Image (cartoon, rainbow, N blue to C red):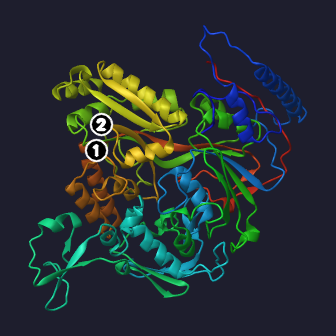
Amino acid sequence: MIPTRCNRAVRASPLIGLPAHQWWRLTGRFHHTPPRHARPRWGRGDRALVGLLIRGLMLGLAALLGTGCRNEGLYYGVVKPPDRPELRIGLGSSPETLDPHRAAGGPEDAILINLFEGLTEYDPETADPVPALAEHWEVNREATVYTFYLRHDARWSDGEPVTAEDFIYSWRRILDPATASPNASLLYCIRNAANVNRGRVRLRSKQTGEFLTDERGRELIIEPDDLPNALLDRRRVELVPYTPEDIGVEAVDEYTLRVELERPAAFFLDLTPHVALRPVPRRAIQRWGDQWTRPGHIVTNGPYTLSEWRPADVLILKKNPFYYAAKEIPVERAVFFLANDSMALLNLYRVGTLDVLATGLLPLPYIPLLRRYGDYVSGPYLMTYFFMLNVHHPPLDKRQVREALNLGVNRRQLCDRLLRAGQRPAHTLTPGDFGGRYPRPSGPLFDPVRARDLMNRAGFPQGRGLRLTLTYNSLDINRRIAEMVQAQWQQVFPELQLELVNVEWQVYLSAMREREFDIIRRSWVADYKDPYAFLELMLSESSNNFTGWTDPVYDRLIHLANAIVDPGQRLRQLAEAERRLIEAQPIIPLYHGVTFFLRKPYVRGWESNVLDKHPLKFVRLQREFGETMVHFWQPKR
């Protein structure tokens, strides 16, 4: 976080020539705004710094004016390619971890896809999987076995080769319950992956040595929570836990990986570029333990290695000389600016300190202006922003209360008056019909009259006696959304008491995992282009379902759908499951997103795609753009 004395946005221009982190510390000294009735008192040191800032601003203005205005009005801010092949990115929150198996959010993902490479990589324009460590692959006729043929020239950053055994070790590690990976369930389509991750056991006859099965020939499995109450004859039956060796992945040889699925999964190949399925370095983990991701310890196999990491400041990547295509990587260094202050990041972009300002970090009051410029980029996005409700916290355990809160949100107003970047009101968890293939059900619309009626019937007339907290992580967009929904609920339920809780990213993740919230904001971006990428989130066994809501019928509908080979029938079954989710209301969908970011015109390869994935190996910088300054604008207060 930018170290300022209050949470108001930094609007002072930086000193020309100062590194960004020094500017943040400098401006933080006199960023505090005193009350209107107070008279500011300036010390000698403050006057000197103010004079220095004024001189810096004058010099900066003179330098900017001297660059000429050939492209005035085309782009927002200075257009000057960096002096060296370096990309500077405004990322937002500082990542919680650089362990691909423990990472849970967007900030981590944006960095990890450049440190580690998987079987496939995201195409920068379509987000489809393209060959990476796997040069090619084969699929059997039943679509249950995938065989990947790995490159022979792939190396870790310590010079060791990347082999099929690296994937076996990594996938066993993420499925190990001790790893506690939030993304382990993504691998459940692999044979026995769920059984290992959930600690299930099989029953084996002591007499025959064979595993017991049901009438359909399926092995009898007991959940660990059911073991104390299981009625078993231990003289005849023994319990056999699933082991990592039972997972359906094997090395045919050093560079051939064979993966066996539980059943056909149309989305499996789309999963392979996901961070959770990328290999991690066994030797570094065994040597350094939980400290293996630190600079100097970390070993990567992607196009970049970790050079420097100053939390809440910057994270720097440098090109990996052992990467098999290192000579083809144009950007030699990537600098991620880590700050929650979107206004400060926009200022850095405006004066040319940043080349890219990522999706979700543009200050909302600036959106109408920024959309006029050529460096504003927007496009479709498989993303849903919603509130999770803790159904174990009364009165949110009452469906009437949850439904009333949902009906009391005016999403159209949220999108049209606040967000204004093309977002669409959300009434379902899934963000679209996936090319006309998915018969997405409809959700309830804004209905304040019915909302008040439901709240009255639940025992809280006008919201009287209802006290709730709404938790969100520190970003301007999250704060503004929380404040607007708070105001909307206040109009519908005048006596409702809603406390807004603003916390840093790491505290937010902890509160979510420990379910220390009433209502918490959440956004979910598809891991692949299929409705299951969203609906899997709310399964009882999902490591990302923090609502406490479970429904065996919903689970069964989802699992049955994924066992159906016919694509149309499968999607209809998924739609039936989502309809049940809508009726239960453990979440309140707010809007379906769009990608919207700023990108200097000399940056190529950082494209808008539906998953908002940006592998830096495809990014290049064009130097034919001269220095330019365009109109600077401030919204009216």
Tell me which amino acid carries mark 2: Pro
**Residue 634 % position (x, y):** 68, 24
Q: Residue at x 24, y 49 (%)?
A: 580
Counting every numbered tag in the picture gives 2
Residue toward you, 482 or 622: 482
Residue 301 appears left or right of 264: right
Q: Which quarter of the image is occupied by the N terminus?
A: top right
| Mark 1 in CB contact with mark 2 (< 8 angstroms) | yes
- SS class, disc 2: loop
Residue 46's disc number: none
The residue lying furthest to the front in this view is 44
Neighbour tally class for label 1: few under 14, some 14-19, many 20 plus, Cα within 10 Å: many
Report the front residue among 521 and 449: 521
Identify whether 232 is placed above or below 108.
below
Mark 1 or mark 2: which comes first in sequence? Answer: 2
User: Which corner quadrant holds the C terminus?
Assistant: top right
Residue 57 visible from this viewpoint? yes
Residue 316: x and y in percent read 69, 54
Direction from residue 204 to residue 562 in the image, left or right: right
Residue 266 visible? The answer is no
Residue 585: where, in percent of width, then height? 27, 41
Query: Picture quarter containing residue 633?
Result: top right
- Residue tagged by mark 1? 582
Residue bearing mark 2: 444
- Nearer to us: label 1 or label 2: 1
For this orientation, the residue located farthest to the bottom is: 208
Q: Nearer the viewer, residue 493 or 440?
A: 493
**Residue at horizontal 20 percent and vertical 57 percent from the top:** 552
Q: Position of residue 227 (x, y in %)?
A: 17, 68
* Viewer-side residue, 40 vs 85: 40
